[in-house]
Image (cartoon, rainbow, N blue to C red):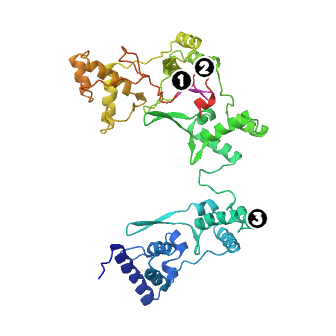
């Protein structure tokens, strides 16, 4: 006798429990399972399993060609039948009735509804159903039928009016918000957070896997930063109406952010004059988890701009006249991190994150790219140029002598500057042009 698998055993055990419950207690199938019941929270429960989800899982299996005929017959016996999809006109009528019964329902919610059902280690995705019609599966097939000419242009127009465009696919994504609603959301966000419209429009730079990435301002599930950047782009192409320009201007949005070096210097000078204690190096400090914030003026990220200039200097692409102007204002083109301070930063990170290791793949500690610093210190350590106290300090963070000398990255520092550390990630090539374009600052 062939041994029964665990999944088959579970099926027969649960099936007969449902079968005899329906037969002895005279319970109709509709009380235990309908596609609509699966999408609700009112499931029929036995002590050992969810009967509604069990029948829903095998309801989906009925559509498979290789499904066990014996199990199919057993399910049909209690009324679980997977019928073929009705015609397009019938589905249009079903959709109209469904929208009338559920006023807040949208086509997007139907198409992207997904509930995972698991039985015997196998998982199935249960889509939105109207009766026996699987809406996402039907829509996928309807798009194919339209291309083959099986759906008329009249039917396609009716489906489009209901939110099911068979000519252009309905895609899942962030919500599309009309202009006036976007303005209202921005006003509420500005009032709640105290941010200016220009600050919302600026993409903040954050460290992710050792690289600077753009992080946009979100309002609930709406990307406000990208939306404002798109409005600026439309303004450049003269695609905004005067009314729209007036509404955005009333929020304080600055449309002109493509400032050249001369304009950037003017903004920097204004900030230094307004705050005598502020230095140009403090403007260039990278945003980190410690709470520092990039200085944004009229939608222009001065911190990021100066970091680009520092990277251009290191690569030898910074124009001499720009170097002179920045040097006059006391701008440091290199940032030194003393050995003791570097060790303290690493220790603080180890206390915060016990799994952190200097030898790991991670490149940053609160905005500080420590790898070049470690490589330089290790080289001096292997060369015997450090005192015993300094060697002990380094050993406390896991930096010890090795048989091979770890070479510095090409763009890290000069041969004799082992304390040199640049806060800016240059894994991607910076623009060599002296002008910083808006896409370089706000991609």
Question: How many neighbours does mark 1 have within 10 angstroms: few (below 14), some (14-19), or many (20 or more)?
Answer: many
Q: Which residue is mark 2?
A: 434
Residue at 54 percent across and 73 percent down: it is: 35
Q: Is residue 278 visible?
A: no
From this view, report whether residue 321 is shown above or below residue 427: above
The Cα–Cα distance between marks 3 and 1, rounded to whole angstroms, is 54 Å
Please state the extent of the stretch shown in magenta in the rendering: 294-307
Q: Are marks 3 and 2 in contact (CB under 8 Å)?
A: no
User: CA gap, disc 2 to disc 1?
Assistant: 10 Å
Q: Secondary structure at mark 1?
A: helix
Q: What is the total number of numbered labels drawn onto the structure image?
A: 3
- In the rendered image, which residue does mark 1 sit on? 308
| Label 3 or label 1, whichever comes before in sequence order | 3
Q: Secondary structure at mark 3?
A: helix
Marker disc for residue 153: 3
Q: Position of residue 341 (x, y in %)?
A: 33, 22
Residue 325 appearing in the image: yes
The mark nearer the N terminus, 3 or 2, is 3
Which of the 4 image quadrants contains residue 131? bottom right
């Amino acid at each position: 006798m062939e041994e029964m698998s665990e999944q088959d055993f579970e099926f027969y055990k649960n099936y007969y429990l449902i079968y005899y419950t329906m037969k002895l207690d005279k319970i109709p199938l509709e009380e235990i399972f309908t596609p609509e019941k699966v999408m609700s929270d009112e499931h029929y429960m036995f002590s050992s399993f969810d009967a509604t989800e069990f029948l829903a899982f095998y309801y989906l299996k009925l559509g498979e060609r290789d499904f066990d005929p014996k199990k199919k017959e057993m399910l049909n016996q209690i009324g679980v039948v997977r019928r073929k999809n009705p015609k397009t006109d019938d589905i249009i009528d079903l959709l109209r009735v469904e929208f009338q019964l559920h006023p807040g329902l949208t086509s997007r919610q139907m198409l992207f509804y997904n509930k995972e059902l698991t039985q015997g280690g196998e998982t199935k995705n249960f889509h939105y159903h109207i009766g026996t019609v699987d809406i996402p599966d039907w829509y996928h097939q309807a798009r194919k039928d339209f291309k083959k000419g099986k759906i008329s242009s009249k039917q396609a127009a009716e489906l489009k009016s209901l939110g099911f465009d068979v000519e252009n696919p309905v895609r899942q994504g962030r919500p599309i918000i009309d202009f006036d609603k976007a303005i209202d959301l921005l006003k509420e966000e500005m009032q709640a957070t105290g941010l200016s419209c220009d600050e919302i429009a600026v993409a903040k730079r954050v460290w992710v896997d050792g690289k600077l990435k753009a992080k946009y301002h979100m309002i609930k599930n709406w990307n406000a930063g990208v939306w404002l950047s798109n409005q600026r782009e439309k303004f450049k192409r003269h695609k905004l109406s005067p009314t729209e320009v007036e509404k955005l201007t009333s929020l304080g949005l600055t449309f002109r952010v493509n400032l050249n070096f001369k304009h950037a210097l003017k903004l920097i000078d204004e900030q230094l004059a307004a705050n005598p204690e502020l230095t140009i190096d403090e403007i260039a400090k990278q945003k980190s988890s410690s709470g520092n914030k990039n200085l944004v003026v009229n939608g222009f990220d001065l911190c990021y701009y100066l970091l680009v200039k520092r990277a251009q200097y290191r690569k030898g692409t910074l124009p001499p006249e720009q170097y002179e102007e920045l040097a006059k204002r006391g701008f440091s083109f290199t940032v030194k991190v003393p050995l003791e301070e570097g060790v303290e930063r690493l220790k603080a990170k180890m206390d915060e994150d016990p799994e952190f290791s200097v030898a790991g793949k991670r490149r940053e500690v609160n905005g500080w790219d420590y790898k070049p610093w470690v490589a330089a210190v290790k080289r001096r350590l292997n060369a015997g140029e450090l005192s015993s106290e300094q060697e002990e300090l380094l050993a406390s963070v896991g930096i010890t002598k090795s048989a091979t000398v770890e070479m510095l990255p090409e763009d890290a520092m000069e041969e004799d500057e082992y304390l040199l550390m640049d806060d800016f990630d240059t894994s991607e090539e910076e623009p060599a042009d002296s002008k910083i374009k808006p896409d370089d600052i706000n991609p």
